[in-house]
Image (cartoon, coloured by chain):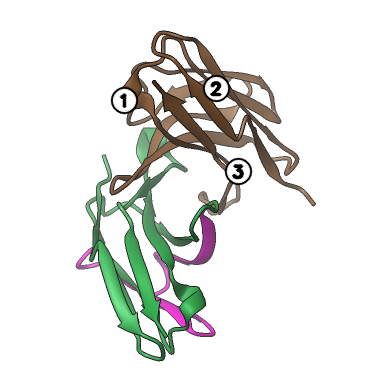
Chain colours: A green, B brown
Amino acid sequence: GENVEQHPSTLSVQEGDSAVIKCTYSDSASNYFPWYKQELGKRPQLIIDIRSNVGEKKDQRIAVTLNKTAKHFSLHITETQPEDSAVYFCAARGYGGSQGNLIFGKGTKLSVKP
Amino acid sequence: DADVTQTPRNRITKTGKRIMLECSQTKGHDRMYWYRQDPGLGLRLIYYSFDVKDINKGEISDGYSVSRQAQAKFSLSLESAIPNQTALYFCATSGTTSGGASEQFFGPGTRLTVL
């Protein structure tokens, strides 16, 4: 089945700097890669996603890139702000019998220092 | 607003007790999921259901059971709770699209403590 590795587990940046979180996946048939943000005490919420027919997607200060050949995808946050502090999860969509299921990485705790 | 709700939000129980966590959604989604979140381990899938007559085990189903009472309701049971089931539990829903996967919407979570 699918396996998703996420790095780093913690990331601390100064306000205004960029942050990059990387994930790798194992199943070459996976075709959907969302990123979720979980603020302290809150539920995970989708911030951006990408499908396998696209190499990059941007939404204001966040972007996701996908390299299908290398089976990795990354989240890029530019001009970080204190409100970006949260735990971020990447995920990949499983295939075959578990079609539609998401396999999550273990999360990255991002701290943005004012 | 269409939403995903969970009850209870917090629960403290003792080892050996039977516990039921409930999830309801007004999004009209067919697919529902139960996840467990532990620090440093991310979100792990316990059970999932693609419609009322469909129940499937996830990654960590041992010690848990589920019931899909209706399209909008999906409950998780711990038949005999044990301390290592202390965790934050999330219910989630998603719709179906022609492209396959779509966004999962999470409930607010249930914090369960087993003493």
Amino acid marked by disc 3: Gly
- Spatial CA distance of label 1 from label 3 is 22 Å
Q: Which residue is drawn at 42% across and 73% down?
A: A54
The numbered mark, 1 or 2, whose residue comes first in the sequence reads: 2
Give percent across and percent down for residue B66. Answer: 52, 19
Magenta: main secondary structure equals strand
- The stretch drawn in magenta includes residue A96: no
- Residue corresponding to mark 2: B54
Q: Quadrant of the C terminus of chain B?
A: top left
* Direction from residue A33 to residue A42 in the image, left or right: right
- Spatial CA distance of label 3 from label 2 is 21 Å
Classify A33 as above or below B97.
Answer: below
Q: What element carries label 3?
A: loop
Give percent across and percent down for residue A89. Answer: 38, 58
Image quadrant of residue A94? top left
- Residue corresponding to mark 3: B107
**Segment colored magenta:** A44-71
Q: Residue B84 carries which label?
A: 1
Pinpoint the chain carrying mark 1. Answer: B
